[in-house]
Image: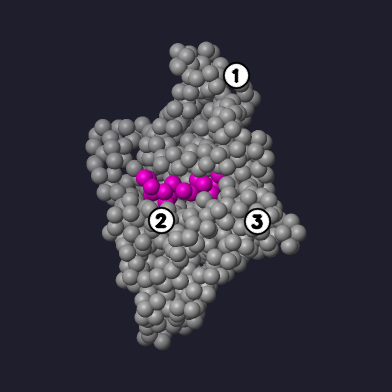
Amino acid sequence: MSEPAPLPSMTDKLPQPKLVVLAISIVAVALSLFQMYGAGIEPLGLFYQRSIHLAFVMFLAFLMFPVFGSNKKRGVLGWAIDLAFLAGAFTTGFYLSFYLDEIINRAGFWSSSDLIIGVIATITVLEASRRAVGLGMTIIGIVAIVYALSGPRGALPWLGEWLPGILSHRGADIDRLVGQLYLGQEGIYGLPMGVAATYIFMFVLFGAFLEVTGAGKFFIDMAYAATGKKAGGPAKAAVLASAGMGSISGSAIANVVTTGAFTIPLMKRLGYRPAQAGGVEAAASTGGQITPPLMGAGAFLISEYTQVPYLDIVMISIFPAILYLGTVYLFVHIVALKNGMRGMPASELPDWRQVLKEGWQFILPLGILIYLLVLNISPMRVGFWAILSVMAVAALRYVLWYFFVAPQNGVKPSHDGLKQAIKKGIAITIAALELGAKNAVAVSMACAVAGIIVGVVGLTGLGLKFSSMMIAFSGGNIVLALVLVLIASLILGMGLPVTASYIVLIVLVGPALSNEFGIPLLIAHLVVFWYSQDSNVTPPIALAGFAGAAIANANPMETSIQAWKFAKGLYLIPAFMVFNPEIIEGGSIQIVLWTGFTAILCLVAFAAALEGYLFDHMDVISRILIVPATVGVFYPDLKAEIAGTVVLLIVLGLNWWKGKKNGPTPSVAAS
């Protein structure tokens, strides 16, 4: 057993004064402790939990992100502005939690102080979002507010004249809008913030504890040990490691820059072009967002919106996630075979027995997490106990190393050494508490502004109008409707994080998908959630692809195109869910097995057609035949499914026979 990994730096990347860095650490740790208290010791009421959480998060955002940007000093003006917003963050959270009973008693008859604080809260949320999430989210929030105020009875009646007939509404005055956004349960403190302030934060904190204690390295090493010797081994390890880390990190981009720092250089050394290496990592990291148990916070949101138990969401998402990751893995395998790539030498790979011996403790928290979920305990409470279990196994790891391994290296246990170990354990805990809070800032602010949008949609009836437009544009055709959702998700994803994009889209198009097109509610949510991921890998703005390009030192657009190609399952699998709901809703064992088989067959054939290779090089006619055959399998008619399946089996069977007849290509034989 080796000494546990050193602590990551606890200082912020921003060139901040030491006093500000200390303040950030104190606020971040206080936020995490507050969340731990509410999750495991004394649950708080809805508004208390959400208002205090958001106040902490905004306070942290204004400290972490100076008003004029991270590359400039605040100066006197900057500090004056930031102090004003810090005061606004504190005041809005304190006011709602301290005067909650009085506010509830005068529901609908707001006092002037209620309205003033509500306006301050809305402005403060929008500014904190601009700094932590980006300008795009803030602009959409402002547009939503302006839209709510337009109309004949609104505060901005003249704007209503410019709205097309289908988008027109009566308009809201300031009192009504503030009551909806700040003082009600459908605005800033609505469902998105509720999920962010409970489930999401606890699992983000859980991921931070795993990262700080060295669990991340353990899972990456296990992935390399499992796949490193195979053709394209580092790329396959990237798929597995990125899926594992992405499922708990909650961010595809963060996943790219963490696991990609290890995987991309190894892929380049193996023979992958820089753009391919970055694209593989981006596609695999995006897969982490749809991989249970966390699913980038999506599982909790889907559960809350559909009222389907969280554990059920996790269970039904396992097979689709395997399909997606299997498709990326297959692309990697095909590219490796086409180019005759070798696996890594055994001497350069970690031994799985040694890795398991040194890090077996990190499997226990995941086992505890799954066990508690099966017992139907609240996910928030499950996150609390999962975090405590990580702390316990990390302490156990240090104890085992200190008393059993260190003496073999000449380090004798002593009273001073034990004190140092305790100090180190405290430092690790503080680092994890701080990291978890920092990682949650962007998600929570995105959910706060998403709450503004949801509140406006509810106030103006925009959701029903958007559904009507969607039906009109698609002409009632479900395929065109799905294409429209895909385009909308791509456009929203250019300026919004995945979580916010999903919330906005499901509020706007969810009713139409379920009520007008007859798509089951849960499948409609899964389709929108999956499509919301495409902005990570789709040009012209592919954030995960750009992050991979930066590490690979490749052209960003070329890398994004590669990521888009490797992530094709992101488009096909949701459509397969719609036309074959048995894959989610279940049915007879024969139908489920048939549906699963055809899904796998389609994805394998489609990957082979895109790359032009599977067992051997694929001719143009075979690649063309795969397209209509895939459409036939997707079509909800048994005869079409059987015909498409037969064609795919014949095409792939002939390719296998050709490969067996010709033997390995020279480049493959060389490997």
Q: Name which residue lies at 29% across and 41% down.
A: 69
The amino acid type of the residue labelled 1 equals: Phe
Q: How many marks?
A: 3
Q: How far is mark 3 from mark 1, CA to CA?
A: 60 Å
121 sits to left or right of 574: left
Q: Nearer the viewer, residue 610 or 169?
A: 610
Mark 3, mark 1: which one is toward the viewer?
3
**What x and y, as percent, mark residue 106?**
62, 22
Above or below for 372 versus 105: below
Q: Earlier in the sequence, mark 1 or mark 2?
A: 1
Above or below for 342 versus 76: below
Q: Earlier in the sequence, mark 3 or mark 2?
A: 2
- Residue 4 in view of the camera: no
Q: How far is mark 3 from mark 2, CA to CA?
A: 29 Å
**What x and y, as percent, mark residue 553?**
28, 59
Q: Is residue 633 magenta?
A: no
Mark 3, mark 2: which one is toward the viewer?
3
Q: Name which residue lies at 68% across and 51% down.
A: 637
Q: How far is mark 1 from mark 2, CA to CA?
A: 53 Å
Residue highlighted by disc 1 = 109
**What x and y, as percent, mark residue 228?**
43, 75
Above or below for 321 versus 465: below
Magenta segment boundaries in residue numbering: 528-543
Residue highlighted by disc 3 = 641
Q: Quadrant of residue 461?
A: top right
Q: Earlier in the sequence, mark 3 or mark 1?
A: 1
The amino acid type of the residue labelled 2 equals: Ala
Q: Residues within 10 Å of mark 2 (few under 14, many from 20)?
A: many
Residue highlighted by disc 2 = 563
Q: Quadrant of residue 664?
A: bottom left
Q: Nearer the viewer, residue 518 or 130?
A: 518
